[in-house]
Structures are given as structure tokens and as C-alpha cells.
Image: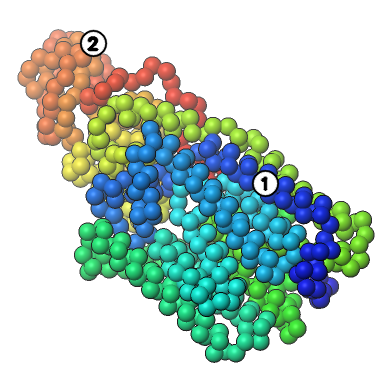
Amino acid sequence: MLAQAEQPSLAAQSATQPRWLIVLLAVSIALVLGITARYATLRNVNWDEFYYLSQVYDAVSQRPVKPLQTFHVRLFPWLAGSAETEIDEINFARKLLLGLHCLTCLCVWGIARHRLSTAASLFAVLTFAGFSYVVSHATSFRTDPLATFLLTFALYCLVQRRRGLDVLAGASLGLAFVLTIKVLMFAPCAVMVLMYQRVENRASWSDVLWRFSRVAVSMAATAALLLTVHIQLTDLGATTAATQAVSVSSHSSQKMFQPWPPVPRLDYLLISIQENRLTWCLILAATCVMFRCLFDRERRAMGWWLAATLWPAATLLFYRNAFPYFYVTIMPLAALAVAEVFNLLCLRWQRTPHAGLAMLLVVIPLVHVLGVVGCFAPRMVDQQVAQREHLRIMHAMFPDPVAYIDRNSTVARFPKVGFFMSTWGLENYRAANQPVMRDILMTHQPHFMVANVAALSIDQSELRSVTHPHLLLPEDFDTLTDHFIPFWGRIFVAGQTFENLGVQLDSFEVLIGGDYVLDATDELFLDGERMQPGEVRSLAPGVHTIHSVQGEQRDVILRIKTAIPAPSQPPAQQGFFFDLSV
């Protein structure tokens, strides 16, 4: 049986492996990383990436920043204003994260070499780098790639069994925790790695506890120091920051974990299985080997190692936010488990070499590479066209920053108002059951709105819903419909339309004050004074009057003044946001 094979030394394993296999794996890794690099500058910018960039701008502009899970703003302050548009800045950050992704691959290699041959270690890197969601999201401008490197580097330090590296591993975990609290889900991995080393090296419990203490103290000290500095820089008092952090942590833990029904993001898991059938088959094989080894005293060390590396994949059973970008974090360790199975196949081939097994060792990496090529070749088109067009026009409309409404802070250089309209945010808003848009409009005076989420698509009346958990309350939908009008594409500006304006005095309410332009076929009276088509009039929030001079006018429009008129060319036939699985 595979799990019962006695392993020779690493040097002996590597020395007897054919050079062609090592070359094949190295070339495959290079090809996969090349595809990742190319796709990084073409892939649609996700709403979270815009949101993370906006937090950087908030910190640079001294706007309020939450104390928890925002430490990345201290790492990227130089990014604000470094390029022409927000998309250019995100693409530049993606290129840097590509370099970090390569370092993560090196860490995977280093960890694998602790136990496995050269070929199996290279296969671990190929499995990680070639997973479809990793190719898509390893360069995403969010905290997951950063945390992935830190977690993998910490594991690399732990397997070296050196006192100084234990402290470094703890510091790495502390920084990862400050970036995202989800790293706490991987705490069992560290415990199982120490258990593996205790069994493997026949260490005493006191040695294990001392090592665990060094890691834990280093992690806690690093996290406390970084959080203290971060909170000081946010100008929040210690009490206020602690209150906010406890509130966010408590609410997040309730929303993040969903023990029943299991696999909250089954849809994305099924897509990943469809795109990575071989990898999931090998993960299943590694799971079987793990259980066999845990119940075999002679192989229990390997069982603990496989348990440690497979645990992150097990979090898919209960983690609510197991979106495709989360797979970047779980796959480095899962790839190490897969590499154990590949290594056992290599050992069997070395003992009894025959053509069938050699062919299998060739086919497995080729299937990986061909899967990546087949999956991403159709996607190698510019998915940022619509986003670039909208950002260019919005900046041209308002050369100076103005408040606006959208899903996720797409225009990071402008102050966004309203809540973050993720599915989570909309569910919380619906649970409160309190209309908020009228107060937002009166308090913050947003000049435009980007309808980059269904909840803001006020041009689609069928999206007015009483019960849908991811749409606005009817009162808020009506408020936006009454006070915003279409401008271009998914851009709406403050304004109102009068479909049939007669000579009778008509009153209307303005919630957003500013300079308004009249778009009409003839002059009319506004607040008792004549106003010509194209004329600009300053309107304060409140009730105003309007009526025609003579006869009836149709489709009279008052809209907030913009620096440019609506472009004549239609927007690109491309969605603003793509699904995360792309």
C-alpha cells in the first residue's frame, strides 16, 4: 500500500529520480507563473480590491479608518496617487503581489524539501501555483496573498526546529493576524505541526510546550505592538478602538462560521472541482492516507503532518466567506499534502520501474498544465475596459473630489458615502429594517452614484423588492429613483425629471444642493424666475417650484452640473464586475 511504503533518505530519493521529470515540473511551474503574471493585468478588478485601495486613501487623507483588519494601509500609503487611475494603481500592486506569490512558492518548496524529494517538492509548487483560483487571485490586491505568504513562511520556520526561527514564525503569524483575523482558523495547523515533530523526533512534551510558548508569545507580542501603532495612527482612543474591535470581532465570528448546513460556498467549491479535478482527487487520496497513518503507530508522524496540511481545506466545510480568493490561503498546505501522494508514487516507481507508472508521473503534471491553459486561454482578454471607461468619465465629470454612492468605493480618490454593499453588508442593512438613503443624501450630499450592484440599479424597476435580502428597502429605492437620473453607462447624477410639465405651479424637493443645469426644449419658471435651457442655477436643499411658461413640456430635466456632458459613444458591452470564479 502507498501509506505503508518505507521511505529512503531524501538524498537517495532525489538522486534516483530522472532528470526529465524534474525538468518537466520546473518548466510547468514557469509556464503557470507566466500565465498568472499575464492574467494579473487583464483580470477584472474585484470590488474588494477597490475597497482596500479606498482604505489606503482614507488613511492618507486622514479620514476615519477602522482599527481592525486595516493594517494594510500602513504597508501601501505610497500607492495613493502613484498612477493615473485607481485601476493603474491596483495593477501595479498586483505586480508586486506577483513577486510575493513567487516567494510563497519558494516557501512551499522549502517546506516540501523538509520531507520530500526534489520532484515531489516541485510538484507541490505546481499544485499550488496551478490551482485555477490561485492563478486568478494570488495577485489580488487584498490581504489574502499577504497572509498566505506570512502563514507559509511561518510554517517554513517551524519545520526547521530552530529557536530563533520559532520566534520569527510567531512574528510572522502576528503580522498575518493584524492583517486579517481569519488566520486564527489555521491555529490548529501549528499545533498539529508540533505534534508531528514530537512523534517524528520523539521529543518530550516539555520541548513541544516550550516551542509552542515561544511561537505564541512572539505572535501575541508582534500583534499587540503592530495594533498599538496602527491604532495610534488612526487617532482613535484606546477605549474607542477596543470597543470597535470587540464589536467587529464578535459580529464577524457570528457571520463567518456556518456549521450547518455545511459548505456554505458549495457553488464555488463545485466550480473549483470542475476546473481542478486531478488536484481534488489527490487531496481525497491524501485524506485517505492521513487516516491510515493516524491509526498506524509506525506512520503516525506522517498522519499528523497530513492532518496539519489538510486542515485549511477542511475550513471549506464551515467558513461562510470561502470565496475563490480564500483558496489562495488554503492551497499551499493542501499542495503539500498532495505532494506526499505524488512522492509515494515516485517511491514505488523507483522500486519497481515500469512504463505504466512512468507514464503516470508524466501525465499528472501535464494534466495540471493543460488544465490551466485550457481554463485561462479564453479569459485572456482585457476585462477592465468598462471599469476604465467609467473611472475616466467620473474623474472628468468632477475634477475635484465630491461625495458619491456605490457598492464598494470604486472611486477611491473621492469620499464614498453609505454602507459597503457586499452580500454581508446588505444582509445587515436588511436585518436593521431602517431606511437610510434620505439621511445619507441630506447629510453627505452625494453628487453622483455608480450603479455597480443590483441594489443600486434604479433604472430596473423590477429590482424594487420588499423582501430580497440583497436589495434596498423599497423606501430607499424610491428615494434614489426620485433624486438621481441616468448620465452614462452605470453612472447616475443628482437630478430630477419632470415628464409632463405644465403651466400650473408644481413643487418638488431637492435633497442634494448644488449647481443644476436645465435640459429642456423651452424656457420655464424655476422658483418664480425664468430659466433658459442650458442655464445653470444654484439650488439649496429644500422645496422648490417649477412650471412651464406656456404649453406643456415633456421630459424636462434638472441635473447637477458636471465638467463634461454625457459622452455620445455608448459604454463597452462588458459587465462592471465579473464573478469571483473568473
| Quarter of the image where one finds residue 504 | top left
Residue labelled with disc 2: 521
Pick whichever, 500 or 48, lies toward us.
48
Report if residue 502 is visible in the image: no
**Residue at left 39%, top 36%?**
83
| Quadrant in which the N terminus appears | bottom right
Q: CA distance from mark 2 to mark 1?
A: 63 Å
Task: Answer few, some or many: residues within 10 Å of disc 2's Cα (few below 14, many 20 plus, some between 14 and 19).
Answer: few
**Where residue 269 sits in the image (x, y, percent)?**
60, 55
Give SS at disc 1: helix
Q: Earlier in the sequence, mark 2 or mark 1?
A: 1
| Quadrant in which the C terminus appears | top right
Pick whichever, 276 or 201, lies toward us.
201
Contact check, label 2 and label 1, Cβ < 8 Å: no
**Where residue 327 sits in the image (x, y, percent)?**
57, 56
Task: Answer few, some or many: residues within 10 Å of disc 1's Cα (few below 14, many 20 plus, some between 14 and 19).
Answer: few
Q: Amino acid at mark 2?
A: Thr
**Residue at left 53%, top 67%?**
154
| Quarter of the image where one finds residue 451 | top left
**Where residue 444 sits in the image (x, y, percent)?**
20, 42
Residue labelled with disc 1: 30
Report if residue 13 is visible in the image: yes
Q: Amino acid at mark 1?
A: Ala
Q: Is residue 573 left or right of residue 314?
A: left
In this view, the mark in front (2 or 1): 1
**Residue at left 60%, top 44%?**
36
